[in-house]
Image (spheres, rainbow, N blue to C red):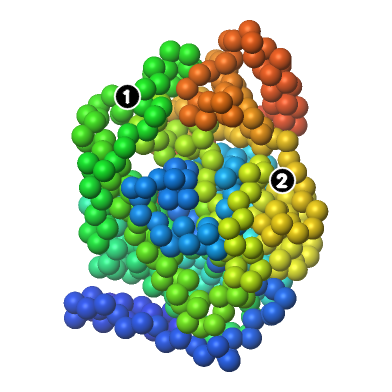
Amino acid sequence: MFHVSQRAVGRAGFCALALSAFAVEFGCNPPASPIAPASTQRADAERPNIIFILTDDQACRAISTEGNKVVQTPNLQRLADEGTYFSRAYVPLPQCAPSRGAMMTGRYPHERGPISNVDGGLKPDSLTLGSLLKQAGYRCGMIGKWHLGDPRGGSHFGFDDFWAYAELKATPRDEKYTRPVFVANGVEQRHERWLGDVATDYALEFISQDDSRPFFLWLGFHEPHVPITPHPKFPVDPASVQLPTSINDSLESKPAAQRNGDPHKLFLQTPPETLRKQIAAYYSMIASVDANVGRIVERLRQRGVAERTLVVFISDNGWMLGEHQMWTKGGMLYEELVRMPVIFWQPGTVPAGRKVDSLVTSMDFFPTFAKLGKASNVEPLSGIDIWPLVTGTGTAVQRDEIYLEYRGGEQDRPDYFEPMLGVVTAGHKYTRYLASGEEELYDLANDPYEMKNLAASADAADVLKNMRGRLGRFQSGIKNRYWEKPASGPASRPAGREE
């Protein structure tokens, strides 16, 4: 039986931990958290509660909203059917910490950092969604994967409740999902339940607290990040898995870094039957997230606050499931890594069945949430308020382009990937490898799987010139010319952590 200070976690958090301990000790599931009566929920009627749900390494096509019939995501599908779905949403950098930092600050990774996973966390003076919304009167909670600094110390950037998954190197790989460690407001505790289920338990406790303030919850699921581990309740038959169309990409016209890099080497070492098993396990993990999303929505309905709560779903970056003969993620800007499924859901406010093909970026969440929360003193941002696009009302700002970047320095190897910059328009994507000068140009309208690199095609010369000009303007405005500097290296990563 574990012991924890009630003062350290607060009364509600203490109760949740005590119930989890009861379950571990006596081999049963903890009883459901008490549901506060709707009459006690006095959230500001003009400002919604906001639940921001973030998965880790979920590829854009690993969800039923993209037509995938193998992965089971009925709850996410329902949110999309009852809300607004963005089909052209991008993260500025396809790596965990930089992507999360951009969402949290509304700024490009090169502006506020971190710029790679080995750069450490957010700068102490960063204005984050947590600190901004807390200043605006919100009760703020962060639950699950953080990856923006050491969860045991340092700033929590405005989050009143900080219940973070502690990814310890000392934890055996086969126990990372089945015996996770959380740091709940400074108190470390190992659980004997599935990681995402524990995170959702904490989320339900946070949602159920009786408080007069609206709340903001950042809920970071670790799934389906490695180690890829199937959830026992959500088996997927490997025989049902269809390998991707672009698995037939020869890579002959692609940059040398792709042909020679570890993602391609890993793919070549993986027989097709093993690849199908891995994808099936990956889909199982996503199905477990979907079930927990269902639990959260059900709790909102039980408490009578669904219509006053905005739920937003996205992944931090994608994963290569055999596409382009790659396994894992890394220094590439393919759609599987940078385009993310994005859902907005709020019954009675967000229209049902709306699909938006406009270009948006994950940096847009910050100004959008700031506007909804009536926050003031917002510094200049790289994102824009996309609420008019969400609701289909008012005047929406339409973009012609989205910029992408990558510095490298993954897996404790500062030279692991080559730095690159990219730009996406309605019809094309252009990438420049900054060390070698190699280029990629894809016609996304006619080649959605990015099989044919047009950078050397005479027929695409005008498009190439246009895209080079766009990217050149973006590059010239970057003051932190990180591609001219070595990566920070592993010394900046908190000791004992595995990210």
- Image coordinates for residue 339, horizontal then vertical, percent: 54, 40
Which corner quadrant holds the N terminus?
Answer: bottom left
- Image coordinates for residue 485, horizontal then vertical, percent: 59, 27
x 73%, y 21%: residue: 466
The residue indicated by pointer 1 is 265
Q: Residues within 10 Å of mark 2 (few under 14, many from 20)?
A: some
From this viewpoint, is residue 292 visible? yes
Quarter of the image for residue 135 reads bottom right
What is the secondary structure assignment of the residue under circle 1? helix
The residue indicated by pointer 2 is 382
Along the viewing direction, whichever of 152 and 225 lies nearer the viewer: 225
Q: Does 180 sit above or below residue 18?
A: above
x 51%, y 65%: residue: 142
- Image coordinates for residue 36, horizontal then vertical, percent: 50, 88
Q: Does 395 sit above or below residue 453?
A: below
x 21%, y 34%: residue: 273
- Image coordinates for residue 176, horizontal then vertical, percent: 29, 55
x 50%, y 76%: residue: 300
Along the viewing direction, whichever of 339 and 152 lies nearer the viewer: 339
What whole-number distance in Å separates the C-alpha atoms at marks 1 and 2? 36 Å
What is the secondary structure assignment of the residue under circle 2? loop
Query: Residue type at mark 1?
Result: Lys
Labels 1 & 2 near each other (Cβ < 8 A): no
Along the viewing direction, whichever of 81 and 478 lies nearer the viewer: 81
Q: Residues within 10 Å of mark 1 (few under 14, many from 20)?
A: some
Query: Residue type at mark 2?
Result: Ser
Q: Residue furthest front?
A: 353
From this viewpoint, is residue 407 visible? no
Earlier residue among tags 1 and 2:
1
